[in-house]
Amino acid sequence: MSIDSHQKNFMKLIEKASRRHRKHEVFRDFCEVMAIALSNAVDKRQFEKRESRYFEILKKYEKEEFNLFPEMFAEVVNSLADKYHDCLGSIFMAMNLGDSWKGQFFTPYSISYMMAKMTFSGLEEKVKSKGYIELNEPTCGAGGMIIGMAQSMIDIGINYQEHLHVIAQDIDETAVHMTYIQLSILHIPAIVIHCNSLNPGKTWSDWSTPAHIIGGWKYRVGTNLVETISEIKVPLLMPAKMVNAMPEMGQLNLFS
């Protein structure tokens, strides 16, 4: 599993932030904090609850430690800007963090990409017939298969930002945050759900990406997506606009 320079920088920063904390806890907190920062920029219905959780995590860290988080986030953004891949999943595996998550394992991106190309055939026909493609990923991990799907669409000239909508689910909360961060950076319209996909009644939280909210997908694929995942049949009314929804670094100042 190859690691690029931005991922290496991320790993150095997490080591620096881990002098008083365990590495897997810093990684977990980073993922949750950045997911909250991205969500609260666009999803106001959950703002207060998530803002409270944000400051609860902040209290665990000294200012110098917590201010490393935006630097880590910038490395993830730059890594994903260079190429399509599972940036956070690769870092997780390279740092052997799975031992702290009961053996959590993320499929190498090369395999996820290959599986996406093999599994999702006839993409052009599906887009022509419906206007967009629906992808339901019940065990999303860090989002590698979804990113592979997006890259597969780009490979054949289809803009996934306009013609793909994703429902991603996982039982692991950190995996949900990892997926949400990466899909948000890549501007993939999606709802990422923390739930037990084998028990539809066990849903703990949902995370709508900026592309989902800004693109108006709520009105294109149904108003109650989390409650009616299996009933997303409403045709696309108009393509989502391509909007750079990434927050500026100034929006990620963690201490005033």
Image (cartoon, rainbow, N blue to C red):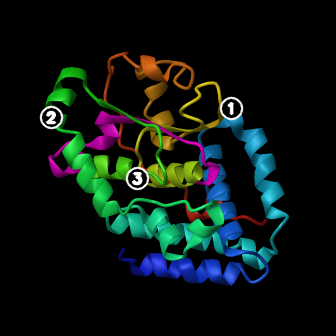
SS of the residue under disc 3 = loop
SS of the residue under disc 2 = loop
Report the span colored magenta: 152-174
Does 160 lie within the magenta span? yes
Of the image marks 2 and 3, the number of the one nearer the N terminus: 2
Q: Which residue is mark 1?
A: 45
The answer to whether one can see residue 124 in this image is yes
Which of the 4 quarters of the picture holds residue 67? Answer: bottom right
Which of the 4 quarters of the picture holds residue 10? Answer: bottom right
Asked whether, in this view, residue 224 is left or right of residue 131, the answer is: right
Q: Is residue 237 above or below residue 165?
A: above
Residue 186 - label: 3
Q: Residue at x 66, y 62 (%)?
A: 28
Q: Amino acid at mark 1?
A: Arg
Tag 1 and tag 3, C-beta contact below 8 Å: no
Q: Amino acid at mark 3?
A: Leu
| Residue 165: percent from left, percent from top | 38, 34
Q: Which residue is mark 2?
A: 122
Asked whether, in this view, residue 227 is left or right of residue 156, the answer is: right
